[in-house]
Image (spheres, rainbow, N blue to C red):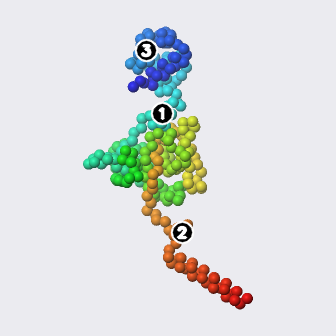
Amino acid sequence: MESTLATNLRSLRKERGWTQQALADRLGLTRPTLGAYEEGRSEPKLSVLIDMAACFKVTVDALVRGSEVEVNSRRVKGDGLRILTVSVDAEHDNERVVVVPVKAAAGYAHGYGDPEWVSQLPTFGLPLKELSLDRTYRMFQIEGDSMLPIPSGSYILCQYVDDWMSVGGLRPHIVVTRNDGVVFKRIENDLPGGSRLVLHSDNPAFAPYAVAGDDVIEVWRASAYLSFELPSALDGQPASAASVRSALDTLRGEIDALKRKENQG
């Protein structure tokens, strides 16, 4: 595979209309040596890289890796190096769902790439037709009221997202960041143009906020949630039979009172 340096070197030379010999003369190199650099068959020393960067009026980092925009673009599209540690059922060689409880979520941003740390987390199998066998799923427990009506303490079942350009549309995701750790929010995508994700809560008491793309470690698309807090008969939920009978008795009493009043009049 051709290196980024080789591609950038050749592109920068052609943009300036220089031949290989002309650039080699500027750098004090032979044409075959420069040709080897452009073809990725040889890597220049640091002193030569510094001379090249000065010649093209770019930084050494931009020469070796590409511009900051290009680097960020490759990263958000999943082309950069990311470490995803998974748990596998040794007997059937199937991936298991790793559970990240609230207590472990605080350390997840540091331990997510450590196989030994991840192996200490609970796992389970979930053979449901709605889940694809060729996808990686993880379950994160959330806390707080920012995503009500999903209650604090719920577990969010998520699918791993490699290409961050596919997220957005205010769909719910688990976002893992270096500064804030694990958060459950709806995403407004501003990558790579604004180099950020804007995170929204379902609870209007919480204002949206932005996180820089460089601060993001992982993104997981929410698929379902598990809650052990059963709904009550309040807030529009079905009422009990006793409360229905009580309401009917009250209504009958009010109707009887109206009839008596009409008869007396």
Kind of residue sitting beneath label 2: Leu
* Residue 107 seen in render: no
Vertical position of residue 80 compared to residue 147: above or below: above
Image x and y of residue 258, in percent? 67, 84
Instruction: Give neighbour class at mark 3: few <14, some 14-19, many 20+ (Cα, 10 Å).
Output: some
Image x and y of residue 156, in percent? 45, 53
Asked where in the image residue 202 lies, by quadrant, the reply is bottom right
Q: Secondary structure at mark 1?
A: helix
Q: Residue at x 70, y 86 (%)?
A: 262
Residue at numbered disc 2: 234
Mark 2 or 1 closer to N-term? Answer: 1
Instruction: Give neighbour class at mark 1: few <14, some 14-19, many 20+ (Cα, 10 Å).
Output: some
* Residue 147 seen in render: yes
Q: Residue at x 45, y 51 (%)?
A: 223
Q: Tell me the tag on residue 35.
A: 3
Image x and y of residue 93, in percent? 29, 46
Q: CA distance from mark 2 to mark 1?
A: 49 Å
Vertical position of residue 67 compared to residue 197: above or below: above
Mark 2 or 3 closer to N-term? Answer: 3
Q: Nearer the viewer, residue 107 or 62?
A: 62
Q: Secondary structure at mark 3?
A: helix
Instruction: Give neighbour class at mark 2: few <14, some 14-19, many 20+ (Cα, 10 Å).
Output: few
Kind of residue sitting beneath label 1: Arg
Kind of residue sitting beneath label 3: Gly
Vertical position of residue 31 compared to residue 105: above or below: above
Residue at numbered disc 1: 74
